[in-house]
Image: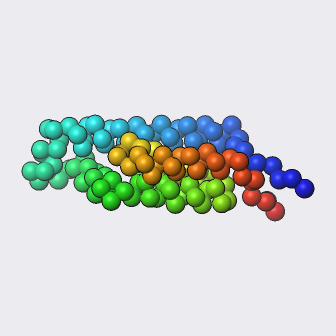
Amino acid sequence: MKKAPFRLTPYQVQWLLVVGFVTVGYALYLRYLAIEFSGVALACDAGLQTMLCKSRLLATYLFRHSVFGIVALIIATLHVIRPSIVLLTAGLIAAGLGVVLYNLGLSGIAIGLLILGFARPAPATA
């Protein structure tokens, strides 16, 4: 008996599109208007305690230690082993943040693994 490959419903595709655009949009906002923008960088480095400065500090800490890429790679590996929409969503979020926030190598491999997850059979349902 041949198992059917992992397929997404139209609603799941729309969900992934929304999540992907929001994730990449927020990552672009953080990168270009918080991390690289010199006015915000100088204000945050001088000790300004706003939510933007705290987000900037957290994002820089995470991408310096390649957390986005490592998490995306772990989730993508789990998605290849057992494909599901939850793992695909989490992997898309981590990989989207990683691609924009300087973890391109590991996040690129993770995106390839997420795509490879569609070649696997869907998990059996009871």
At 44% from the left edge and 58% from the top edge, which residue is drawn? 70
- As drawn, the residue found furthest toward the left would be 46
- The image shows residue 64 at horizontal and vertical percentages of 30, 56
Q: Is residue 120 above or below residue 18?
A: below
- The image shows residue 107 at horizontal and vertical percentages of 46, 49
8, 111: nearer the viewer: 111
Number of marks in picture: 0
Residue 85 in view here: yes
Q: Is residue 66 above or below residue 11?
A: below
Indicate how the structure is coloured in the image. Answer: rainbow
- The image shows residue 16 at horizontal and vertical percentages of 57, 42
User: The C terminus appears in which quarter of the rendering?
Assistant: bottom right
At 74% from the left edge and 58% from the top edge, which residue is drawn? 123
- The image shows residue 28 at horizontal and vertical percentages of 35, 38
At 53% from the left edge and 38% from the top edge, which residue is drawn? 18
Left-right relation of 111 to 63: right
33, 65: nearer the viewer: 65
Quarter where residue 37 is shown: top left
At 68% from the left edge and 47% from the top edge, which residue is drawn? 118
- As drawn, the residue found furthest toward the right would be 1
Left-right relation of 88 to 52: right
Residue 51 in view here: no
117, 32: nearer the viewer: 117
3, 88: nearer the viewer: 3
User: The N terminus appears in which quarter of the rendering?
Assistant: bottom right
